[in-house]
Image: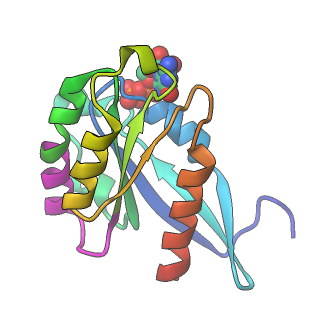
Amino acid sequence: MSNMQYDYIIKYIIIGDSGVGKLSNSVEFGARFVNVEDKRIKLQIWDTAGQESFRSITRNYYRGAVGALLVYDITRRETFEHLLMWLEDARQHSTSKTTYMLIGNKCDLEGKRAVSYEEGEAFARQRGLFFMETSAKTSANVEEAFVNIAHDIHEKI
Ligand code: GDP
């Protein structure tokens, strides 16, 4: 089977404030394949392409999303403070089966950290989300986050 062929496409979306690294993460995660038994599944990551600044993310964006990556920037506290708003908006627009993964991005910038690991973890734990800190720049933990996504897909197929 060639690399381009697949049996299913699974849609994941990325949400969060502008500049947190959504585009960078979608490049890291996008166009990957997951094998489940004899099926080959293409992971398709949608990102908001800048629309987040207009708060105009449509229902169409959320429709059919198996999972959502909720991204903040560990060096910009306000991006963490806006998470609840993003989560509420996403939950309003998607089904109860959507899996949410909280991603604290830019963990390579330790010296500029404005949100502790524990705060991110507590936010996620209280709301039953997966949690990871990643760096799209150094690829730190990107593989681990992808493994979590693959597990989620395994459970749902
Ligand atoms: P978006 O607006 O959420 O899609 O964010 P982008 O993916 O466009 O990233 C915004 C800026 O942050 C860009 O200059 C990226 O190069 C930079 N960036 C993204 N991820 C990381 C990261 O993990 N570490 C560092 N240091 N910079 C990052």
Quadrant of the snapshot with the N terminus: bottom right
Q: Is residue 124 left or right of residue 92?
A: right
Task: Identify the image quadrant of residue 34.
Answer: bottom right
Residue farthest toward the top in the current orientation of the protein: 111
User: Eyeballing the image, is 22 above or below 92?
Assistant: above
Q: For this view, does 22 lie left or right of residue 153?
A: left
Query: In terms of image quadrants, where is residue 88?
Result: bottom left
Task: Give the tally of numbered discs.
Answer: 0
Asked if residue 9 can be seen in this view, the reply is yes
Comparing 76 with 42, the one in front is 76
> In the rendered view, does 154 fall on the left or right side of 50?
right
Point out residue 122 in the picture as x, y percentages from the top left corner. 24, 50
- Residue 94 is situated, as x and y percent measured from the top left of the image, at 24, 65
- Identify the residue at image location x=40%, y=67%: 66
Q: Residue shown at 39%/33% (left/top)?
A: 49
In percent of width and height, residue 76 lies at 27, 21
Would residue 26 be counted in the magenta stretch? no
**81 lies above or below 123:** above
Q: Residues in magenta?
A: 85-99
Tell which of 119 and 32 is nearer to you.
119
Q: Position of residue 95 (x, y in %)?
A: 24, 72
